[in-house]
Image (cartoon, rainbow, N blue to C red):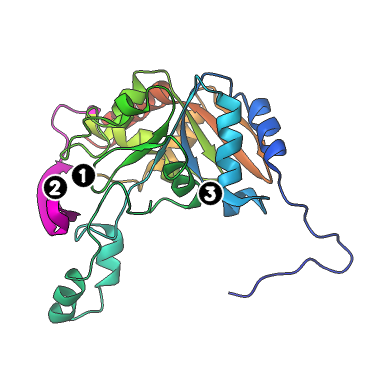
Amino acid sequence: MRGHSAPADRPAQRPVTSEQIVRDLRLLGVKPAQTLLVHASLSALGAVAGGASAVVRALRQVVGPEGHLVAPTGTEENSTTSRAHRARIARLTPEQALAYRDTMPAFDPASMPSGMGAISEALRTASGAVRSAHPQSSFAAIGPQADLLMADHRIDCHLGPDSPLGKLDKMNAQALMLGVGYWSFTGFHLAEYTYTSNPPLRSYSCVVRAAGGGRCWMTYDDVVLDDNEFEDIGKSMEMELAVNRGLVGDVQCRLVPLHPAVEFAAEWMRRHRI
């Protein structure tokens, strides 16, 4: 796609600076020592001087050394049951699909890039960051309790109570939505585990890096994850819950209290999904 230059009668857009992001985040309501679950789009923020790393530096400055930053760092490229994989093989023959399967990257938490965007990847690779070991729905965290937050991420609990997301739900975390909609809000996925005692399950399959550098395929059952209704849930939620809204850089952003949002979504699902 070709880039678009500014019209001759309008000045080029100034880059968004780290200092501006710090100021905007504080105005949005982010405070020192907070725990933030970050969902973000670098392109939506505008032209950021210093790129994704500058955004992470600004986030770290605002929450300070006592705060925590957490971001989803999930991957789809190593899964045969992901939406991305199904799209890739849609026009392949069965033989071609099998050949493609043999080339899929094996998940290694230390080296596989985040599939959740540039800011997520910058947080994953930042100094002091710790990543959970789930081969499809990992998270990365920075902060004094990052190791505890990322520990014991069960294979059969992508985004449920036994994931980092479940721990954040108990910590009064805030979800920071930087230029993204509720379609990306992982907190609503946590509600999919809690809105009923018997949520629907499905099979998942992915390839991981085994000891010694080999490849190992894993198949397991977990809750069906369906984000199709998340924008509707978010719109309904904002009519009842206090959600801070404001500009960060060039885009409207939200600061959402995680636990009340999960509780609202669970009740919404009880009314609409059962």
Q: Is residue 22 visible?
A: yes
Give the amino acid at mark 1.
Val
* Amino acid of disc 3: Ser
Could you tell which of marks 2 and 3 lies nearer the N-terminus? 3
User: Which residue is painted at 62% across and 48% down in the image?
Assistant: 45
Q: Contact (CB < 8 A) between labels 2 and 1?
A: yes
Residue corresponding to mark 1: 224
Does residue 156 show up magenta in the picture? no
Question: Furthest residue to the front?
Answer: 212
Position of 3 with respect to 223 (left or right) is right
In this image, 129 relative to 208: left or right? right
Q: Point out which mark residue 161 bears.
A: none
Q: Percent x, y for residue 11?
A: 85, 59
- Percent across and percent down for residue 19 are 71, 36
Would you name the residue on which mark 3 appears? 41
Mark 3 Cα shell of 10 Å, populated few (<14), some (14-19), many (≥20): many
Rounded to the nearest angstrom, the CA distance separating label 3 from label 1 is 25 Å
Q: Which image quarter is the N terminus in?
A: bottom right
State the image quarter where residue 62 is shown: top right
- Position above or below: 49 against 95: above
Q: Report the residue marked by disc 2.
A: 202
Residues under labels 2 and 3: Cα distance? 29 Å
Res. 266 in view: no
Q: Nearer the viewer, residue 193 or 26?
A: 26
The answer to whether 44 is drawn above or below residue 252 in the figure is below
Q: Is residue 41 left or right of residue 216?
A: right
Q: Amino acid at mark 2?
A: Arg
State the extent of the magenta-drawn residues as a range.
194-223
